[in-house]
Amino acid sequence: MPAHQFDFGNPLFRWTAHDYHPYERSFIWYAVFFTVMIGIGSFLTFFSGDFGWISGLCFFIIMGLYCYTHKDGEKDHEVIILEKGIMIDRRKVLLWEQIEGYWFNYDPTVAVINFERKSQMGLETIPLQMGDLTPDVFRRALAETDIKEMMDRKESLADLWIRVFKL
């Protein structure tokens, strides 16, 4: 084995995850989205006092960044659950020592497994799309590890609104 490779154990389970849920957006969704965004940006620019143009400019920049980051659609990521951690795209590895636990956001419109990683700022949530897989598949694969399911965790209000408006 080359000196630059590490042994993270044998693969226990693998799947393909999207960056975000692949929503089917129609022309009407785009028309409403851009009409509302241009309306908000225009309101900020023309009706927010002498320096309203700064708010409007910032809003339009953020809107442009959103469109730019979503222009390519979803990207697929190979996720492998290993004996010693999780590997994403054969580049990023999260060791089990870094993971506090996992929880699911699962219903007919969304299927996400969230891993809670310990960080300097507390717990950082790492969401991964589950695709067509059910939570039971992940529970069986993760039963061979030391991390536990966090049954008390729920989706945040901001994540709910992002999902509802298919952003």
Image (cartoon, grey):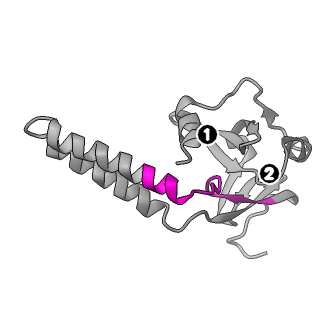
Image quadrant occupied by the N terminus: bottom right
Residue range highlighted in magenta? 15-32
Are the residues at dot 1 and dot 2 in contact (C-beta closer than 8 Å)? no
In the image, which disc is placed on residue 87?
none
User: Residue 84: which numbered mark, if any?
Assistant: 2
**Residue 13, above or below 143:** below
Is 123 left, or right, of 68 in this rendering?
Answer: right
Please tell me whether residue 121 is drawn above or below residue 93 in the rendered image.
Answer: above
CA gap between label 1 and label 2 equals 19 Å
Element under label 2?
Answer: loop
Whether the magenta-drawn stretch holds residue 75 is answered as: no
Q: Dot 2, how many residues are within 10 Å of its Cα: few (below 14), some (14-19), or many (20+)? A: some
Q: Which mark is residue 125?
A: 1
Q: As rendered, which of 47 and 27 lies closer to the eye?
A: 27
- Please name the residue shown 61% across and 39% down the image: 125
Q: Amino acid at mark 1?
A: Thr
Horizontal side, residue 74 vs residue 61: left or right? right
Three-letter code, disc 2? Lys
Residue appearing at x 30%, y 42% in the figure: 40
Which residue is situated farthest in the bottom direction here?
2
Snapshot quadrant of residue 92: bottom right
Name the spot of residue 32 as percent of width and height, x first: 44, 49
